Amino acid sequence: MEQSTKIRMGMVGGGQDAFIGAVHRMAANLDGNIELVCGAFSSDPAKSISSGKKLYLPAERCYADYVQMFAAEAKLPKHQRMQFVSIVTPNHLHFPVAKAALEAGFHVLSDKPATFTLQEALDLADILKTSPQLYGLTHTYNGYPLIKQAKHLIATGVLGKIRKVVVEYSQDWLANKDDELSKQAQWRVDPSRAGVSCCMGDIGVHAANLAEYVTDTKISAMCADLNAVVDGRKLDDDGTVLLRFDSGARGVLMSSQIAVGEENNLRLRIYGDEGSIDWSQMEPNSLWLKSNTKSTQLIRTGVGEFCADAQAAMRIPAGHPEGYLEAFANIYQNFSKQIQAFEQGVPCSNETFDVPGIEQAIRGMAFIENTVKFSQSELKWHDFDLSPTINSGVS
Amino acid sequence: MEQSTKIRMGMVGGGQDAFIGAVHRMAANLDGNIELVCGAFSSDPAKSISSGKKLYLPAERCYADYVQMFAAEAKLPKHQRMQFVSIVTPNHLHFPVAKAALEAGFHVLSDKPATFTLQEALDLADILKTSPQLYGLTHTYNGYPLIKQAKHLIATGVLGKIRKVVVEYSQDWLANKDDELSKQAQWRVDPSRAGVSCCMGDIGVHAANLAEYVTDTKISAMCADLNAVVDGRKLDDDGTVLLRFDSGARGVLMSSQIAVGEENNLRLRIYGDEGSIDWSQMEPNSLWLKSNTKSTQLIRTGVGEFCADAQAAMRIPAGHPEGYLEAFANIYQNFSKQIQAFEQGVPCSNETFDVPGIEQAIRGMAFIENTVKFSQSELKWHDFDLSPTINSGVS
Amino acid sequence: MEQSTKIRMGMVGGGQDAFIGAVHRMAANLDGNIELVCGAFSSDPAKSISSGKKLYLPAERCYADYVQMFAAEAKLPKHQRMQFVSIVTPNHLHFPVAKAALEAGFHVLSDKPATFTLQEALDLADILKTSPQLYGLTHTYNGYPLIKQAKHLIATGVLGKIRKVVVEYSQDWLANKDDELSKQAQWRVDPSRAGVSCCMGDIGVHAANLAEYVTDTKISAMCADLNAVVDGRKLDDDGTVLLRFDSGARGVLMSSQIAVGEENNLRLRIYGDEGSIDWSQMEPNSLWLKSNTKSTQLIRTGVGEFCADAQAAMRIPAGHPEGYLEAFANIYQNFSKQIQAFEQGVPCSNETFDVPGIEQAIRGMAFIENTVKFSQSELKWHDFDLSPTINSGVS
Amino acid sequence: MEQSTKIRMGMVGGGQDAFIGAVHRMAANLDGNIELVCGAFSSDPAKSISSGKKLYLPAERCYADYVQMFAAEAKLPKHQRMQFVSIVTPNHLHFPVAKAALEAGFHVLSDKPATFTLQEALDLADILKTSPQLYGLTHTYNGYPLIKQAKHLIATGVLGKIRKVVVEYSQDWLANKDDELSKQAQWRVDPSRAGVSCCMGDIGVHAANLAEYVTDTKISAMCADLNAVVDGRKLDDDGTVLLRFDSGARGVLMSSQIAVGEENNLRLRIYGDEGSIDWSQMEPNSLWLKSNTKSTQLIRTGVGEFCADAQAAMRIPAGHPEGYLEAFANIYQNFSKQIQAFEQGVPCSNETFDVPGIEQAIRGMAFIENTVKFSQSELKWHDFDLSPTINSGVS
């Protein structure tokens, strides 16, 4: 049966001037079935309330902090209180907020990277083992329809045996020292709020996740070379990682925040022995399917046949471009469906609803810590390591 | 002072299976400051209610028809009742619904073409002369940020004197007879619901509007050649129109719904004596600025400096693609701001708020009727004509 | 049996500073089986000799004019004298040179447009009826391999019934008055050397030829609108022509020499009821094959299967771009093969060797004269007319 | 003074069915100032003669082997005998042929890689120290005009300080076992004729050369990971090399012959702190110049201003695509000019004439041997090494 009320969302972080909070809200708004009902938008209570008011929230549901919010919301009648919290804070707060939310009985949809350290991600996994609540991670780029179609093409053998993965995520927004002045840059270059990595933690982890998601294989070993190109930067702002996958495939992951002229250049190429795919986030409605014996195919959203997951991720006809916010909204929609199933007592694993979850959280944090650690090594190759080696002074 | 409540929207049309109603709702939802509060979604009362329920509306605000809706809403307290109606019906109902809404004291945001006939558009203009209410027309493609930037480049002389305009809008969704089976196709090929034109009325009018909007000049004469390519089709599904503009510039407008392989290919090229621009709706975040003496510039959303209107129409950073729904949302946002100004007693012309209005409505209907009429003439050139010559059997 | 000597070529026109003469020579050189043996490169004898010397010709075969050249060459032993003449003069000399060459027993490969007037083209046809010599016309763009493949796709029904042709040829090299100073511009804007048209005669005729060549149908009626955009220009520098084809298909031909920012933008799109093709001369190694039910195919030179004519027109593997000179060389190669067949007494029609000939010459000149004539008419449509109506004061 | 005769070329290798020999000949032919006068086209004397005949050579100058050719040509009168030899054999013959030619007094233009081993390249350098003859190496891709412009932009500081180089050269022509059957594949996968590497020796070396050429810096250290992806292959067919440059810049070089769907995808991106360039061999007439504060510039051949080297490398106007053969011809033209200078007693270093020479030969062979050696190491980084470590059993 159709749910008759909207899904109720709270938000932690995302006050005025924050970038990613506004993105999450637009993504949640788009399809009209999620309602923002409360928030702790800023660590400054006055700012939190003024931010909430601008979002049309009543003052009593604009909280001074997440502890207060979870306590107050938990006391509201079931049909009023928020159902899930969207966490859009800097990285160091992801874990404590998620932990508190789960313990207070709320589902969690968290921005990435999942936590501050791999240890926290493992701790979160432990909490989720005993908590009935749902946990989702906004690996936005998985939300694009043609990424889902690419995954489907590989799963159904269209490319043959996968041999090579080249994934690149390049930007230039931290190309120079004075780029660090913006609010969203400040914390990303600060080890006490971003964690052990800037570039790999912010965007490299998206690239790694995308490669594993689309190929449905796991990175098994890496050779990493991270750089802090801008003078005085404490964390990496650029790096290349050579990859080996469980399946025997090789790969290259390039990521940079100092590649002048690159906007948000996430590109994924996967080569099999019978075909290859090529997809770029900046032209997300095109997927190139290539072969060495036939003409290239340009698969376009809305034209031809698609797998169910890709079909569900498209809203409008061919030639009407959908972009980043729509991909983000697809993550929110899938998580909403997962919550609906949960509420109806139906089995609701992340896999079934195509929502990145705690496994991706752990692998993402391991990827980040591993790249930093392996980069410092004089040896070339290291096995992908799921044991935490970097101590978090924060959690 | 910031308004503390969302703008309240009603909708006429857009029930289940309708395409454009859902698009309007996503556009209205995106920025979180417009709330759908009521609707008459279908001429079938049961369908209207079931459609409304799926949109989380209470049954009492899902109306059987627009007459009932306007009457009932007008009786609600001011802070509850809808403020504007979004009209997303087939063309023949645009005028009667808009007329009734204005007369009942509601602002109107109408899908295009504005009316069924030019005469109705002129009648609507008459009504608006005495009504205080606002009227907007969703010429979606004006909502793209780089269209606003192109307009700005031309207004500030970057291209020099404009000599030539080439605008094309090609699709293939009506390429064959059996394409007429879908709900949104059925009425578009039916003269009693679409009006005198299919292709020019549905998409050619967007192209003409875009050319006039960006150049800020008016079409003054036309030579038209419309075709009904698919056997048995009563209305045009393809056509070319040669243009002359007030300014002396020449132009070519090509439009087709039978151009197999074209998705939603709206492309605008404008040539001045010192530069030219080239923009394609299917890659809307790129604007090409060319010269014959210097390298081409690729202007990308989010990179570099923009005029205020373009800037206001962008939500996310460079390289995060925004598309059709975001452009549509920009029309809704501008109309919302116009309503806010109205409510606060501030002057609020369509021009100030960059909202297409009754002038575009009249010119659009004249364009449609003129192309049909001129196409039947053996003479090549005819002056653009604002007097209605086709009698509407409906209004 | 393999010919054991190179084909010997003479040239009329193409002295120092001339653009197109150098292009013809590179095209003739590329494949190593054509040898330039003599020339009358300039109407100034000293210039002709100095031009010839730079081309490594002995002084005795650098002639002062074409009359002298044909006379002298005819007296040389058969295995020494030139076999064909390449005519690369301004338009007004094409006919007299071709006539003299044919009468002196030399094959002719002429730059386009074939003649100065349609009457001359008809006269040339009369001469060819009784002359055994061969005549070819360098409609370069037919020489591209993917144009041949597009022709093949249409001939074999891949696009279904052809409905619409859109062909565009835009440049900007005559965008302004001072662009007329270069040697190659001077004569093109001068009616006494270029003929009745500048834009249509120089490039529009290529576009018309390409449309007829690829679709294998003929233009049957036209509606023309030519413009002289630059102040003081006597001939058209821009124009649009609506087309009807024998087959019932419609078309649009746009051509301009004042479209600022356009380099050499020749693009051909052909829409059938089951598919369409899209080809651009500036990216000549890509041919888009589209449908409204399947993914677009990107056909690339060297990848997959090709028809024999296309295959013969490629020299190097996929991804090694071939361009304009190679396409031009393909015309020279095909004409060389035609000459070889002639020498061996084998039937050697232009059609068999895929060489544009006198029929294209006549249709091209008719296209040019028709567009000028029809543009002056107040009536919209006129039948394509093969009778000469413009008197040439030259021939 | 202008030379009054063509430059006379001999060829070793390049008989029927050979790919690269035909390419060299077309490159030499294009501009009409180089004449093929003799050749030893095949190790089979009969084949050599039949190949030569097809190239219009007299039988007496079609030699059975290069030893015979050099001896016989040296005895011819100065104005008849060949001036330089073009070496287009498999790799293992490059050195002995070049050595013999130099010793017999002929200039050498050699296909790459220069030799079979680094030791041979060093030996060749020793010979050149005492030989007056000229030596050039056909690193084709340096011949593209926009590569020269990119080099100029970097040399003049337009990109600021160079931070990162990403160069990729991917193909798919050896993607599968049965791709090895063609003549040109057979020897490339055979260590006794190709040398220690297939992929790096055939194309990776082009990528490395291009990176050093354009940036005018040298690779100082590498981390290499080569793969033999196809079962049973003895040499690498894929690999990635991380780079450090003298200047402190980092880099990534990816190369593959098994990347299904890639044609001849050589792409160079160079990021400075103020700008970046992006160039792809498959669209060679476009050079992207990007910044993080201004619109991207699309530099197109023929549009705007160029440095002298780039200007000299263009033959035809904007929009008339020049490709691979023209780039190759530019190498031949530059070498021809170097020979002319030599003949006139003018100083004629490779640098002055922009011809890749012995230094590139040595660095290329070192690159190849280093990548193979470093790939086998467990350590990540190794200094670029100019001392030969692999013993050639052949030379």
Image (cartoon, coloured by chain):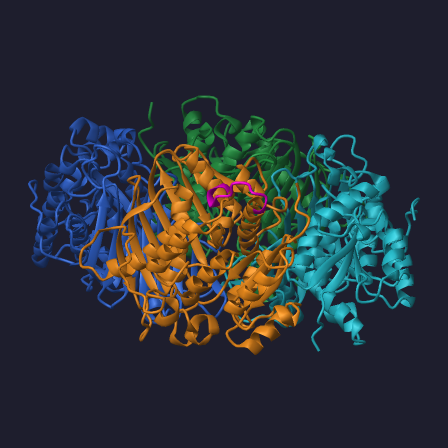
Chain colours: A orange, B cyan, C green, D blue
Q: Nearer the viewer, residue B52 or D392?
A: B52
Q: Nearer the viewer, residue B324 or D235?
A: B324
- In the displayed structure, D378 sits above or below B277; it is above
Q: Position of residue C328 (x, y in %)?
A: 46, 42
Q: Position of residue C216 (x, y in %)?
A: 60, 31
Q: Position of residue A83 (x, y in %)?
A: 57, 56
Q: Nearer the viewer, residue B167 or C83?
A: B167
Task: Please give left or right for residue C1 compared with residue A46 in the image.
Answer: left
Whether residue D129 appears in this view of the structure is yes
Task: Please give left or right for residue C44 compared with residue B351 in the image.
Answer: left
Residue A254 sits inside the magenta stretch: no
Q: Position of residue A288 (x, y in %)?
A: 47, 42
Q: Which image quarter is the C terminus of chain C in?
A: top right
- In the displayed structure, C198 sits above or below D88; it is below
Q: Which residues are magenta?
A: A343-352
Q: How many dots with numbers?
A: 0
Q: Which residue does the image show at 36% across and 70% down from the upper left?
A: D273
Whether residue B250 appears in this view of the structure is no
- Asked where in the image residue B364 lies, by quadrant, the reply is bottom right
Task: Please give left or right for residue C220 compared with residue C298 in the image.
Answer: right
Q: Nearer the viewer, residue C372 or C89?
A: C372
